[in-house]
Amino acid sequence: MTYGDGGGGPGAYGGGDDDSEGGSDDGDGRGMLSYFTTNSLVIFRLCMSRKMKDALEMIDELVVEMNNFHFLQHAEAPTIDHPQTHSHVNESEIVGRQNDKEQVRVKHHFELVLWVCVSHKFVIEETIRSIIEVATVEQCDLTQMEALQKELCGVLGNKRYLLVLDDVWNEDGQKWDAMRSLLNLHAGSGSAIIVTSRSNQVASIMGTLPPHQISLLNEDESWELFRRIAFGREVEKQEELISMAKCIVHKCERLPLAIKATSALLCSKNHGQWVSVMDSDVWKDDIVTTTGIVPALQLSYDHLSSEEKICFSFYAIFPKYRWMDKEMLIQLWMANDFIASETRGQEIFDVLVWRCFLLDVEIQRDNFMYQPTTCKMHDLMHDLAHHVSGNDCFILQESSSCKEILQGCTHASSLQHEVRHLTLDYISNDTIAAMKEILAPRPRTILIQDISKSLSMAKKKSMSLRALNTLSIKKNLINLKHLRYLDCSKSNISTLPEATTMLYSLQTLKLIDCKELKKLPEGMRYMSSLRHILLVGCESLSRMPRGCGIDQLKNLNLGGGLSLSELRKVHSAENAKEGNISPKHKLKRLSLDWYGNISVRSYEDEVDSNADEILEALRPHTNLESLLLISYSGAKFSSWMHNPTLLEHISELSLGYCKNCKDLPPLWQLSSLRLLSLVNNGESCMSPTPFFPKLKSMIVSDMAKLERWYQKVEGEVAVVSFPQLKRLHISECLRLETLPEGLLQQLPALEKLHITYCPNLMGAFSRGGACWNLIQAIPNKSPNLAHGLPRRPRC
């Protein structure tokens, strides 16, 4: 492969074949083996004629005129949010792909290397904004395309860059042409773009050279992958199984997913079970021809328990490539009586992950209070789920098959009597009206994406409905007495109907991002089965049932996350104790905010002596994992924050705007701490001898009084150690003069260093400064360090 064509234009690769399964890493650096398993590569040439540019400008003018005449635009179907991929990968866990890596990963040729996750969602403005943010390591708030184009010009600056657009699905050629034109304007000679995709159509749209197809593993790589999972490091102790193992690997036909699923199945089996797997009829060719299912995956499914089988098959209700929330899956399993408890649901989920039925498990940390664990299913596994579920699960989409059903040509009879779990995926209300008499009269699950009259499917005949995802709940609730799961997230409801309180079987109520929701019904206290209520992002919610005093928490067995706001209104420590926070052992995340949405400037010099006692009374259980303390107005932190035993499970700690506290707790004694954020606090120095054995991310920001990280002791040198720290962010520390001696030498894992608005540090750490040689090898640095140009704070 070449990255130039003599004239400086980028080279090209193209899309891939989903069924080739030609890879061995299980994701984009997040799991053991999946990035090259699923993605193919595309690179396209950045070139645009003057005529194309003129045409684009003319289109912009027409859009302005259209807006002046108030012409209507057809809205696109809402896109689905996906967890972000990234460029980091643990190469020690990858099997094979050496040749592919040598062809694709050429870094030293480029001045700038960027990685942007695109996935199903493709909006030009958002993609450009992401490129800017990756390049500058700073948030970009620009919304206008003209402003984004100018900022992109400054970021790329005609450098020779390599841009990776990962996990691309959008097949709109016009969008890609517009995107290509923007990138071409600022590309230096020899620049290149790599696109990973499973879609051949994407490859044909974007590629200027033939696509690079990711090949299958060879025999040695196949055996190495199987050996790692089935035997680990004890392969020499398994001599009696090795010959069978190599025979089974051969039957997997060099497909990484098949090898992983089979090896995970066999790792805990005895000799007789290995023989049974090797001699199974599932390997016969006629079985594959009949079902189209990969034999190894069918075999792995056959060895699941009955509970595990039905939970796995339920995934057929979700469209391919859809990211799923683990808690949602478990709640839906419970709503449909597949499992009896959340504990059992967690066990089954773990089994499905270990056995490779579910992939890319990741905790989303964008929101402190709501951090869902997401996962997805490989498309070959999804085919298996669809096969074993029969007609029990059905996805209705606007397609030719849908029209055939409406015309009575196919499946109408079976759908009417067999479908129990139904997804309506971005379809029109007209289709719903036509389908509701054909589809199952008594569905158990209805999941609806973006339609306003969704309850029409639940009218009259839905007495047995167990789970419903909808945007409208104004009526017909009386017919849903068996409902156990109700998701109205992102709807525009302002009040929850009183009839909701009649849903006595309801276990889960999700109202995430219902920004207009103002209050909940008074009768909710009678909903004895309710165990999950999610109110994250309900910005207008000002009233809970029967008041909103902290004493209302006393008898609630809370789990997950809890946010207590405007704690300055709590009258006394006795009142705070009535919240009964300490015994709540299921509570994992706790946010304590003294002033809520009030500007921090309004209480800058206030010291509340009552706050110390209130914070003391809010001592959490020792199982707490994340603590966020905001705008605390006391003069000192509580005794329980100085007791490492009480905070032994804390992995995330954020202290913000605690301006009156002069001394930090002994943070280095928190053995589980992985993320530490200190923003606008009152400390003038950090505590001595900090050792953080597990800390991976640290933020020190807006610390106006901070002068040094340690207290100077005559005759002693402060020694610091962050053996696992990957990200260090220091900003707006105007008085900070130096970092602890030896700090950078004690950061063996550091991948990202961000230093901005720290005038006393910039000279030493910018290019050519005294400390530049210590940081120049760090792969991701803020641009002001790399270019030696300290940036001024924005007004």
Image (cartoon, grey):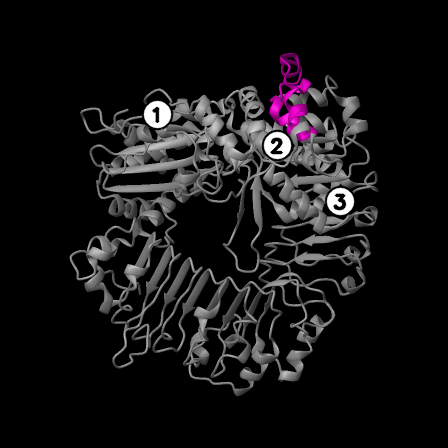
Q: Which label was assigned to residue 13?
A: 1
In the rendered image, which quarter is residue 519 located in? bottom right
Placement of the N terminus among the 4 image quadrants: top left
Q: Residue furthest left?
A: 768
Q: CA distance from mark 3 to mark 2?
A: 25 Å
Residue placed under numbered mark 3 in the picture: 339
Residue at (53% x, 60% y) in the render: 368
In the rendered structure, does residue 494 fall within the stretch colored magenta? no
Q: Which label was assigned to residue 223?
A: none
576 over 373 or under it: above or below? below
Tell me the SS state at disc 1. Answer: loop
- Range of residues picked out in magenta: 273-302
Q: Position of residue 117 (x, y in %)?
A: 42, 40
Q: Which label was assigned to residue 266?
A: 2
Q: Position of residue 204 (x, y in %)?
A: 40, 22
Ranked by sequence position, the earlier of labels 1 and 2 is 1
Nearer to us in this view, 163 or 537: 163
Nearer to us in this view, 557 or 146: 557
Q: Are marks 1 and 3 in contact (CB under 8 Å)?
A: no
Q: Position of residue 572 (x, y in %)?
A: 62, 84
In the rendered structure, does residue 283 fall within the stretch colored magenta? yes
104 over 735 or under it: above or below? above
The mark closer to the camera, 1 or 3, is 3
Residue at (49% x, 41% y) in the render: 31
Nearer to us in this view, 217 or 396: 217
Tell me the SS state at disc 2. Answer: helix
263 over 451 or under it: above or below? above
Please rate how many residues cluster around mark 3, counting C-alpha atoms within 10 Å: few if below 14, some from 14 to 19, many from 20: many
Q: Are marks 3 and 2 in contact (CB under 8 Å)?
A: no
